[in-house]
C-alpha cells in the first residue's frame, strides 16, 4: 500500500465513490459524524455521498430530525444520526466541558448559572417549539443573565453538551434550537465501554486507512480512551505500515481501481480532509496554507483528482445559476479541467441550478 492507495481507499470507505448508502442518516451513522460548521457545505458533503440527493433532500432530513446538528466530537459542530446523539454526547461531552472550565470561569459562568439556563430553555422550548439564537438570548437577558463577552454562545454550547438542546430546522436564514429529547426521543444509550468500541469502529471503518493519532484528533478522546476503543476492535481491522506509520482499515477491502480518472468538488469542511490529523495523503503540505489561510480554521472548498487535492474553488450564487470558479495550485491539464467541470456540474445539480458563466 502506498500514499495513492490510501487516498483511493479513503474515497471508497468514506462512501464518496461506489456508495452503498441511500439516506442522509445512513451517511451520518456510517461516518460517526459529519463536520458541520459550514451549514451549506455540510449539506453538499451529504450530497457527495448520495449521488441522487438534492439540497432539498438534506434539508428535509434535518427538518424530520433523522440527522441532528450539535457539538459532539472535540466540542465542534457536527451532524450525527439521531439514533446516535445520546451515546456520543455521553461519551464525549464530559471531556469537552472539563476543557472549557477555565474559559467559563473567566466568563463568570458557574454550574448554578448553567442550571438556570437549562430550566429556561426547557420551559421555553417544551411542546415542539423552536426558537432562534436571538430568541434564546432575549429569554436569558430578560431573566437577568448577561449575554456579554460570548456568554450566550457558551451557554448554548454547554446546554447542548448537557443534552438539553440541539439545532433544529432553518427559519429563513436563521437556525433554530429545540429540545433534544423531543428531536431524538429514540436515541440509543450505550455503556461507556461499548461506546468507546462503537465510535472507534465507525471511525476506522469509514475513514481507514487511518492512524491512532488521526482518531485521537478527530474524536477528541483522551489517548487512553482512544487506544482502548481501538484495542477492542482490532480483530475486525487490518494493519498496514506506510512510511513508518501504522494505519488501520477494515478487513477484506482491496484498493479500488477505477476505469478512468475521477474528480471531486469538495466543500471546505468535508471529512475527506478534516477527518484526519495527518492530511498529507490528500494534500501536499506546500499547499496547506492555500486551503486554510493562516491556519485560521476556515477551510476553502477543494478540487481533487483521484483523491489528491490540486486546487480550491468557490461558488457564487446568482438568481438562476451558480458560478463555480476554480483556482488550481498549478496549471491544470485539459483532462483535469474537463473532470472538474463534471464535478462542478454535479454540485450544481445538487442545488437544482445550472452552472453559470463567471
Image (cartoon, grey):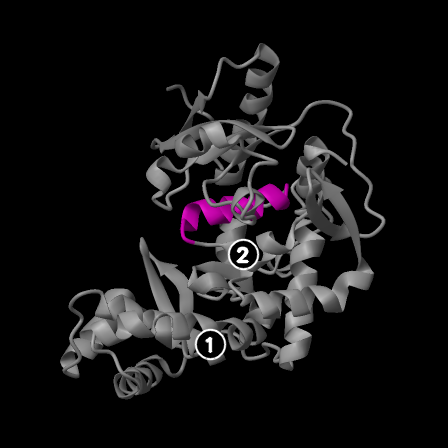
Examine the structure image and report whether residue 84 is included in the region drawn in magenta. no
Q: Main secondary structure of the magenta part?
A: helix
Label 2 crowd bin: few (<14), some (14–19), many (20+), radius 10 Å: some
Lower sequence index among marks 2 and 1? 1
Residue at (20, 78) in percent of width and height: 108
Closer to the camera in the image, 264 or 125? 264
Residue at (55, 17) in percent of width and height: 337
Residue at (82, 62) in percent of width and height: 235
Residue at (37, 41) in percent of width and height: 295
Mark linked to residue 218: 2
Q: Which residues are magenta?
A: 37-51
Q: Identify the element where label 2 is drawn.
A: helix
Give the residue pinned by disc 1.
Answer: 94
236 up-or-down from 193: above or below: above
192 up-or-down from 281: above or below: below
Q: Identify the element where label 1 is drawn.
A: helix
**In this rendering, does residue 122 appear at all?**
yes
State if disc 1 and disc 2 touch (CB < 8 Å): no
Closer to the camera in the image, 22 or 217? 217
> Looking at the rendering, which quadrant does residue 258 occupy?
top right
Label 1 crowd bin: few (<14), some (14–19), many (20+), radius 10 Å: few
Image coordinates of residue 152 in percent, x first then y, are 24, 69
Closer to the camera in the image, 252 or 54? 252
Amino acid at each position: 500500500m502506498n500514499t495513492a492507495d490510501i487516498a483511493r481507499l479513503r474515497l471508497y470507505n468514506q462512501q464518496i465513490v461506489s456508495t452503498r448508502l441511500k439516506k442522509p442518516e445512513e451517511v451520518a451513522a456510517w461516518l460517526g459524524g459529519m463536520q458541520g460548521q459550514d451549514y451549506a457545505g455540510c449539506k453538499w458533503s451529504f450530497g457527495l455521498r448520495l449521488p441522487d440527493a438534492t439540497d432539498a433532500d438534506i434539508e428535509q432530513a434535518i427538518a424530520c430530525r433523522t440527522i441532528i446538528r450539535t457539538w459532539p466530537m472535540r466540542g465542534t459542530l457536527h451532524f450525527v444520526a439521531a439514533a446516535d446523539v445520546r451515546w456520543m454526547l455521553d461519551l464525549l461531552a464530559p471531556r469537552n466541558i472539563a476543557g472549557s472550565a477555565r474559559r467559563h470561569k473567566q466568563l463568570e459562568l458557574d454550574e448554578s448559572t448553567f442550571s438556570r439556563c437549562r430550566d429556561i430553555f426547557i420551559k421555553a422550548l417544551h411542546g415542539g417549539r423552536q426558537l432562534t439564537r436571538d430568541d434564546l438570548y432575549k429569554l436569558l437577558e430578560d431573566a437577568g443573565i448577561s449575554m456579554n463577552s460570548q456568554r450566550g454562545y457558551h451557554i448554548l454550547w454547554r446546554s447542548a453538551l448537557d443534552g438539553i438542546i440541539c439545532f433544529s430546522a432553518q427559519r429563513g436564514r436563521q437556525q433554530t434550537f429545540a429540545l433534544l429529547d423531543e428531536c431524538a426521543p429514540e436515541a440509543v444509550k450505550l455503556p461507556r465501554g461499548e461506546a468507546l468500541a462503537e465510535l472507534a469502529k465507525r471511525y476506522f471503518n469509514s475513514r481507514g486507512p487511518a492512524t491512532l493519532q488521526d482518531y485521537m484528533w478527530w474524536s477528541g478522546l483522551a489517548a487512553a480512551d482512544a487506544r482502548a476503543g481501538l484495542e477492542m476492535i482490532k480483530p475486525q481491522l487490518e494493519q498496514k505500515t506506510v512510511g513508518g506509520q501504522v494505519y488501520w482499515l477494515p478487513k477484506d477491502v482491496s484498493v479500488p481501481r477505477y476505469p478512468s480518472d475521477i474528480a471531486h468538488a469538495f466543500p471546505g469542511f468535508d471529512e475527506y480532509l478534516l477527518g484526519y490529523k495527518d492530511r498529507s495523503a490528500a494534500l501536499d503540505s506546500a499547499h496547506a496554507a492555500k486551503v486554510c489561510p493562516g491556519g485560521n480554521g476556515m477551510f476553502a472548498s477543494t478540487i481533487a483528482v483521484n483523491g489528491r487535492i490540486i486546487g480550491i474553488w468557490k461558488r457564487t450564487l446568482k438568481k438562476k445559476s451558480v458560478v463555480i470558479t476554480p483556482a488550481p495550485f498549478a496549471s491544470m491539464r485539459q483532462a483535469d479541467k474537463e473532470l472538474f467541470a463534471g464535478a462542478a456540474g454535479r454540485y450544481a445539480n445538487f442545488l437544482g441550478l445550472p452552472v453559470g458563466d463567471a
